[in-house]
Amino acid sequence: LGLPGVEDKLERYKQFLRAAGKAGVPYTTYGHMANLRLGYSVTGRGRARGLVTRVFDEAVARSYPWSHGREFSEQEIWQSFPRFAKAVVPVAEAAGVRIGLHPDDPPIPTLGGVARIFRNYEGYRRALEISNSSHFGFCLCVGTWAEGGRATGRSPAEMIRQFAPLGKIFKIHFRNVDRPLPRFTETFVDDGYLDM
């Protein structure tokens, strides 16, 4: 969000990348989601085969207060990402660590007043353009793509066909949901609406 302390956070992330490289860890997943840790992406609990699962209902989430005291526009978030990429990608290259961008989960335009820019194909395409590095690619979360459905702009198979030949899919999360937004319940991979 570019809030006070951002330079310290960038420095800590760079230290993490250097440490990962020294330890021989070649990959890390990164999420550019300001309110991921605040529980805004879970609005309830469901059940699948007797186990507790995550439920997300966009109508319920819209009733939540702003997670950071005010709204942050898409333009503001797009200003923060190049700053992040410029700071950390050269360090990742030097450390031999690849960074895989996780899509915004859930892939909705805003959550808790914070715009979400990596919710669709266009956001991923633009992130690649900005980072411009063999050490920056994607964690293709099939579950997040299933949550978004047609609003993501490309199916998981289309994403694979486009980005795998470029060597940009570094990791895949296999998850599934019972249906796309505006409300979904996580399921086992063989029980969801998306045919794995």
Image (cartoon, grey):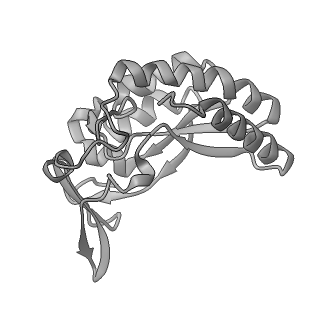
The residue lying toward the viewer, choosing from 61 and 106, is: 61
* Residue 134 in sight in this render: no
The answer to whether 179 is drawn above or below residue 161 in the figure is below
Residue at the location (32% across, 65% down)? 190
Residue at the location (31% across, 37% down)? 155
Q: Position of residue 16 (x, y in %)?
A: 73, 44
The answer to whether 40 is drawn above or below residue 17 in the figure is below
153 sits to left or right of 126: left
Extreme residue toward the right, this view = 22
Q: Position of residue 28 (x, y in %)?
A: 64, 45
Q: Position of residue 46 (x, y in %)?
A: 23, 71
Extreme residue toward the bottom, this view = 50
Q: Position of residue 25 (x, y in %)?
A: 76, 49
- Which quadrant is the C terminus positioned in? bottom left
45 sits to left or right of 76: left
* Residue 86 in sight in this render: yes
Residue at the location (60% across, 34% down)? 5
> Which image quarter: residue 169?
top right
The residue lying toward the viewer, choosing from 35 and 189, is: 35
Residue at the location (47% across, 18% down)? 79
36 sits to left or right of 169: left
The answer to whether 194 is drawn above or below residue 139 in the figure is below
